């Protein structure tokens, strides 16, 4: 499994490449849909879709391609939720915010590092990349916030620990 784990950690894998890799290894102990989460970007595919996290930055083009490949027009995304301020989750935020015209939402305790482009707190410096100051359009404080889209509630639950402002989004049908 070592070689496949290395391949799955690639941040630039297309959806087609991922499906082919998963088909080659049907005995993987994890469902392929869970493995595809290696991008650190998730799409809530509603009529008004919401993007959760944006990958490390290098994958922004692939994320847009993958969104389109599942039948969602990327320009329909108007909200990006960032679960915490580490580079593998926020790295694509400046690019995707600009290209999609989407608003960024995150917990206030992690927002300052994103707004300031803090390469240490975002851990960008550890990877030898520069994270630019990025607009955070909406923050929340306290334990929860809710985004309602198309009759579905996306609850943003504050779950500090990994970072002070880490959140765990979940859907209420």
Image (cartoon, rainbow, N blue to C red):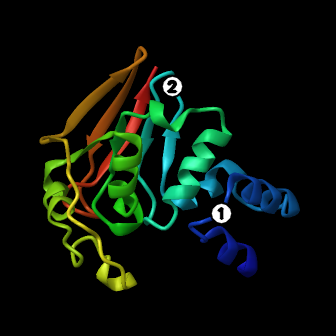
Give the residue furthest to the top: 151
Q: Secondary structure at mark 1?
A: loop
Q: Do the residues under discs 2 and 1 have CB atoms within 8 angstroms? A: no
Nearest the eye: 162 or 11: 11
Query: Is label 2 in a helix, a strand or a loop?
Result: loop
**Residue shown at 21% from the left, 55% from the top:** 165
Separation of disc 2 and disc 1 at Cα? 24 Å
Depicted 76 relative to depicted 65: above or below: above
The disc placed on residue 54 is: none
Q: Which residue is mark 1?
A: 13
Instruction: Tell me if 123 is positioned left or right of 67 in this view.
Output: left
| Quarter of the view holding residue 124 | bottom left
Residue 63 horizontal/vertical position (percent) = 54, 52
Q: Is residue 158 above or below residue 95?
A: above
Near mark 1 (Cα within 10 A), the count class, few <14, some 14-19 or many ≥20, is some
Residue located at (27% from left, 54% from top) = 166
**Picture disc at residue 46:** 2
Along the line of sight, the residue nearer the viewer: 143 or 92? 92
Image coordinates of residue 30 in percent, x first then y, are 69, 57
Vertical comparison of 19 with 51: above or below:
below
- The residue lying at 51 percent from left, 40 percent from top is 43
In percent of width and height, residue 20 lies at 82, 58
x and y percentages locating residue 97 in the rendered image: 34, 47
């Amino acid at each position: 499994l070592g070689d496949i784990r290395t391949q799955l950690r690639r941040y630039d894998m297309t959806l087609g490449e991922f499906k082919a890799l998963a088909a080659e290894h049907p005995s993987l102990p994890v469902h392929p849909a869970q493995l595809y989460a290696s991008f650190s970007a998730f799409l809530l595919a509603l009529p008004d879709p919401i993007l959760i996290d944006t990958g490390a930055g290098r994958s922004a083009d692939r994320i847009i391609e993958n969104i389109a490949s599942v039948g969602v027009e990327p320009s329909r995304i108007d909200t990006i939720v960032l679960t915490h301020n580490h580079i593998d989750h926020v790295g694509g935020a400046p690019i995707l915010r600009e290209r999609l015209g989407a608003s960024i939402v995150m917990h206030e305790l992690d927002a300052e590092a994103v707004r300031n482009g803090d390469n240490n707190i975002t851990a960008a410096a550890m990877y030898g990349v520069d994270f630019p100051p990025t607009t955070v359009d909406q923050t929340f404080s306290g334990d929860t916030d809710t985004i309602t889209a198309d009759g579905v509630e996306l609850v943003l639950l504050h779950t500090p620990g990994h970072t002070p402002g880490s959140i765990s989004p979940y859907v209420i049908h």
